[in-house]
Image: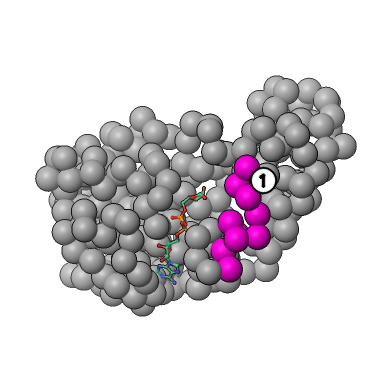
Amino acid sequence: MKPSIVILTGAGISAESGVKTFRDAGGLWEGHRVEEVATPEAFGRDAETVHRFYNQRRQQLLTVAPNAAHTALAKLERDYQGGVTLVTQNVDDLHERAGSKKILHMHGEILRKKCTWCDAKSDCRQDLDKTDRCDSCAREGGLRPDIVWFGEIPYHLEEIDQVLGDAQIFIGIGTSGHVYPAAGFVERARSNGTWCIEINKDQTALSTRFDDQRLGPASVEVPNLVTELLR
Ligand code: APR
């Protein structure tokens, strides 16, 4: 059995597919204040603006494709003779479309919706607006993207802590390390002697916490690392 691997991806892995990151130049937070579009309070105050922000991102997602980095991670999960768990902060479906199966979307998924009245969740590939009715409770105005907003608890935290505790290798790909709890995963991994590898096009706030750093675009560095791991 080979060493078990936990991978954490961020917006940087989807950048070369044409999906905007959050904090790069021209990123999503440049055009919007987080408080206006990515908090429960914003949704309560101005659901129309929140829906517009996510409707634009959902429509754009349907026009892009996975890149070589997503494909390489799917190959690693298929061919590696050890455990591979993919944790992603991304709400896109590019890992799924590239063929990855074991994915933990800790910030939710933009192609899913949930009802704030009854909590029913379902697929969502069309625009949402505040007049939409929930298929389960039939109430209007409560449907929102199934995305974890600032101030809300991310999904799968217990399972993520479990796999981090068992991992021998932790790989952080395309994340700036600004948002917790994801930004704390490298410390959790280091605390039990896990070998930590960072792939990013730039230095990040967490680069010094990694044992090995691959500086470059994910579409180049991720396939290179996967080739090494499959040797
Ligand atoms: N290859 C590798 N890394 C890249 C590439 C690329 N082609 N393009 C950008 N990056 C890196 C940037 O250098 C940056 O470190 O990806 C990172 C993107 O950082 P953010 O935009 O902050 O995205 P992320 O870290 O995923 O944000 C975390 O913050 O706003 C919340 O919920 C949102 O999930 C998101 C969380």
Q: Quadrant of ligand 1?
A: bottom left
Q: Secondary structure at mark 1?
A: helix
| Residue lying at 70% horizontally and 27% vertically, measured from the top left | 116
Residue beneath label 1, please? 37
> Which of the pair 54/25 is nearer the observer?
25
Scheme of colours in the image? one colour
Task: Please state the total of marks drawn on the protein image.
Answer: 1
Q: Which residues are magenta?
A: 26-35
Residue 51 percent coordinates (x, y): 75, 46
Magenta stretch containing residue 117, yes or no?
no
- Dominant secondary structure (helix, strand or loop) of the stretch shown in magenta: helix
Single out the residue that lies furthest toward the left.
193
Query: Which image quarter: residue 20?
Result: bottom right
Instruction: Locate residue 122 relative to residue 14 in the image: left or right.
Output: right
Is residue 53 in sight in this rendering? yes
Residue 49 percent coordinates (x, y): 76, 47
Quadrant holding the C terminus: bottom left
Amino acid type at circle 1 is Val
Instruction: Locate residue 41 relative to residue 202 in the image: left or right.
Output: right
> Which of the pair 9/215 is nearer the observer?
215
Determine whether 150 is above or below 202 in the image: above
